[in-house]
C-alpha cells in the first residue's frame, strides 16, 4: 500500500480529487498536450499506474454521501495498469493520456471505463464484467483490444479510434455479450475484427469506418446475434467480411461501402437477416457468397454485384431495387443469377414466383425461359439440340405464339409453291377439287384431315419434297407445343 508521503505532486492531486470525483487536469494548454508526444512529458505530468490501481481498489474512499470517481486528463501513466480480477465499484475516466504499458482488466468487475483521446499499447479485458460502458472514443491503441467472453452492460464505443495490430486481430471479442451496441464510427483499424458468437442487441455500427487487413479477414462475426449491422457511409474493408451463420433481427446494410478482398469479399453463408441492403459504392473486388442465407427483403441496385455471386440455397421474401426500370428488370435479375458459377434452378423458380406475386406474369415466364436456356448447357449434345428446337418453335412453352408464326410462314410457303404446280389425283375424277391453301394446312395438321391430302399428291419435283417437309414440320410443331406446354405447367 502506498503512503501519501510517497506520492509525487501530480499523484497527490489525483489522490485528493478521487473521493469526490473531481477531475484532475495536467495539461499545459499547448501543442505539447497531444498524447502522441506523451513519452516526452516530464514528472510534473507523470502518474504511476500503481497509484491509479490503489485508488480504484478503495484506498481513499472518502465520505459516504459522495460518489468517488477517477477522472484524469493529460497524464503520462508509467508502468502497467493492472486491474486483473479486481472488483471496482466506481468509474474510471482517463482523457488525452499516454500509457507506457498496456491495461489489464482480465476477469475484473468494473463500472464504466472511459479512455478517450489516449494512446495505449493494448487492452486486455478478457472475461471482464463492465456494469456500464467501455469507451475508447478518439484513442489510439497500438496493440490488441481483447474482449473475449466479456460482458458489457452498456455500449462499446470505439468511434474515431485507431486500432493498430497489423496482421493480427486488432479487436478480439469472440463471445462478447452486450446489452447495448458496438459503435465504430469513423474508426481506423489496421488488423482484423473478430466477433464470433457475439451478442449485440444494440447492433454493430461501422459507419465511415476503415478496416485494413489485406490477404485475410477484415471482420469475422460468425454466428453473432445482432439487431442490426451497418457497414455504411463509405465503410471500407481491405479483407474478407465473414458473417457465416450470423442472425440479424433487423437490417444488414452495405450502403455506399467499399469491399475489397482476394477471393471472397463477403461471406454470408447461412446468414439470416430481416432486410439485406446491398448497395455498395462499387462492385466488390471479390465474390459474394450467399449460399444457404435467408433474408426477408433483398434491397440492391444495378451495378452493385461482383462477377461471382454464389446463390445456391439463398432465399428471400421480397425484392427491392433502387431506380428500377420495368423493361430491363428481368434482364438484370437473370444476369444476377447467372453470376453463380453453377446452374441454380431454384433461383430462377424463386424469382419467377416473386414476379407472379407482384402480378408480373409475363416477367415470370421470361425468367423460366431463361432457366431452360441456362439448363441447356448442362445437357448432352442431343439434349441441347432438342432444347434449341423447342426454344425456336415455342420458347419451351413460354412463347406458344411462336408456333403460330411458324405455321403461318409454312402455310404461305406451301400455298405459293403448290399453286404453281399440278398435283395428281389419288383416284381419277373423285374427291374434292384441289386447293393449295387447304392442301398445305392438311399437310401441317397431323391429326384428322381436310380431305386434300388423301385426294391429291405430288409425285416428283420440289413440291413433293416440300410436302414431306410440311408433314414432318407438322409433327415437330405439335410435339414441341405439347412438350413445351407440359413443361410450363409442371411444377419443375
Image (tube, grey):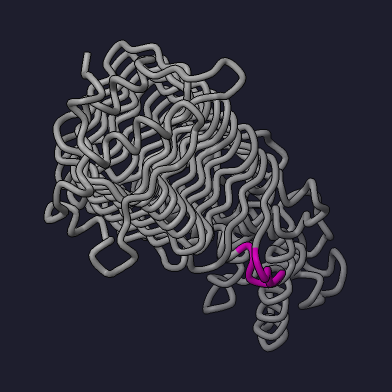
Residue 226: percent from left, percent from top: 55, 31
| On screen, residue 243 above or below 207 | above
> Would you say residue 326 sits in the magenta stretch?
yes
| Residue 179 as seen in the image, left or right of residue 106 | right
Which corner quadrant of the image does residue 153 belong to?
top right
Q: Residue at x 35, y 35 (%)?
A: 14
Whole-percent x, y for residue 426 in the image = 72, 63
Residue visible at 20% across and 52% down?
A: 214
Quadrant location of the N terminus in the rendered image = top left
Q: Is residue 231 left or right of residue 378?
A: right
Image quadrant holding the C terminus, namely top right
Which residue shows up at 83% across the image and 69% down it?
429
| Magenta-highlighted residues | 322-330
Q: Nearer the viewer, residue 476 or 375?
A: 375
Q: Is residue 189 magenta?
A: no
Where residue 150 sits: x, y (%)? 39, 20
Q: 102 above or below 289?
A: above
Work out whether residue 266 can be spotted. Answer: no
Relative to the observer, which residue lies in front, 481 or 339? Answer: 339
Q: Nearer the viewer, residue 148 or 472?
A: 148
Amino acid at each position: 500500500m502506498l503512503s501519501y508521503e510517497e506520492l509525487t505532486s501530480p499523484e497527490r492531486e489525483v489522490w485528493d480529487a478521487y473521493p469526490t470525483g473531481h477531475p484532475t487536469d495536467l495539461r499545459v494548454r499547448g501543442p505539447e498536450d497531444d498524447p502522441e508526444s506523451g513519452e516526452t512529458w516530464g514528472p510534473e505530468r507523470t502518474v504511476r499506474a500503481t497509484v491509479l490501481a490503489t485508488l480504484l481498489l478503495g484506498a481513499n474512499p472518502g465520505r459516504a454521501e459522495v460518489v468517488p470517481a477517477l477522472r484524469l486528463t493529460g497524464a503520462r501513466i508509467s508502468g502497467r495498469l493492472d486491474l486483473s480480477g479486481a472488483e471496482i465499484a466506481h468509474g474510471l475516466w482517463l482523457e488525452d493520456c499516454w500509457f507506457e504499458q498496456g491495461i489489464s482488466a482480465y476477469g475484473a468487475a468494473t463500472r464504466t471505463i472511459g479512455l478517450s483521446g489516449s494512446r495505449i499499447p493494448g487492452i486486455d479485458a478478457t472475461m471482464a464484467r463492465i456494469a456500464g460502458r467501455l469507451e475508447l472514443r478518439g484513442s489510439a491503441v497500438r496493440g490488441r483490444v481483447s474482449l473475449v467472453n466479456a460482458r458489457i452492460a452498456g455500449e462499446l464505443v470505439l468511434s474515431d479510434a485507431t486500432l493498430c495490430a497489423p496482421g493480427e486481430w486488432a479487436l478480439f471479442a469472440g463471445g462478447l455479450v452486450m446489452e447495448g451496441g458496438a459503435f465504430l464510427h469513423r474508426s481506423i483499424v489496421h488488423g482484423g475484427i473478430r466477433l464470433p458468437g457475439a451478442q449485440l442487441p444494440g447492433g454493430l455500427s461501422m459507419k465511415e469506418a476503415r478496416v485494413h487487413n489485406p490477404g485475410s479477414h477484415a471482420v469475422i462475426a460468425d454466428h453473432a446475434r445482432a439487431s442490426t449491422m451497418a457497414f455504411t457511409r463509405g465503410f471500407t474493408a481491405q479483407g474478407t467480411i465473414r458473417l457465416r451463420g450470423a442472425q440479424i433481427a433487423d437490417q444488414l446494410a452495405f450502403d455506399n461501402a467499399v469491399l475489397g478482398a482476394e477471393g471472397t469479399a463477403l461471406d454470408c453463408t447461412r446468414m439470416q437477416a430481416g432486410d439485406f441492403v446491398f448497395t455498395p459504392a462499387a462492385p466488390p473486388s471479390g465474390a459474394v457468397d450467399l449460399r444457404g442465407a435467408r433474408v426477408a427483403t433483398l434491397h440492391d441496385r444495378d451495378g452493385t454485384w461482383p462477377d461471382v455471386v454464389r446463390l445456391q440455397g439463398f432465399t428471400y421474401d421480397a425484392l427491392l431495387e433502387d431506380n428500377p426500370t420495368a423493361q430491363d428488370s428481368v434482364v438484370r435479375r437473370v444476369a444476377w443469377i447467372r453470376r453463380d458459377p453453377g446452374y441454380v434452378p431454384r433461383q430462377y423458380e424463386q424469382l419467377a414466383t416473386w414476379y407472379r406475386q407482384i402480378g408480373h406474369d409475363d416477367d415470370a415466364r421470361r425468367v423460366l425461359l431463361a432457366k431452360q436456356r441456362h439448363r441447356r448447357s448442362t445437357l448432352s449434345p442431343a439434349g441441347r439440340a432438342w432444347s434449341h428446337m423447342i426454344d425456336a418453335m415455342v420458347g419451351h412453352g413460354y412463347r406458344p405464339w411462336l408456333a403460330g408464326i411458324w405455321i403461318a410462314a409454312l402455310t404461305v410457303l406451301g400455298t405459293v409453291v403448290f399453286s404453281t404446280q399440278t398435283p395428281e389425283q389419288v383416284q381419277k375424277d373423285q374427291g374434292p377439287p384441289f386447293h393449295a391453301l387447304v392442301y398445305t394446312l392438311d399437310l401441317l395438321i397431323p391429326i384428322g384431315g381436310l380431305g386434300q391430302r388423301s385426294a391429291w399428291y405430288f409425285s416428283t419435283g420440289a413440291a413433293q419434297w416440300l410436302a414431306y417437309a410440311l408433314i414432318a414440320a407438322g409433327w415437330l410443331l405439335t410435339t414441341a407445343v405439347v412438350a413445351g406446354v407440359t413443361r410450363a405447367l409442371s411444377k419443375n
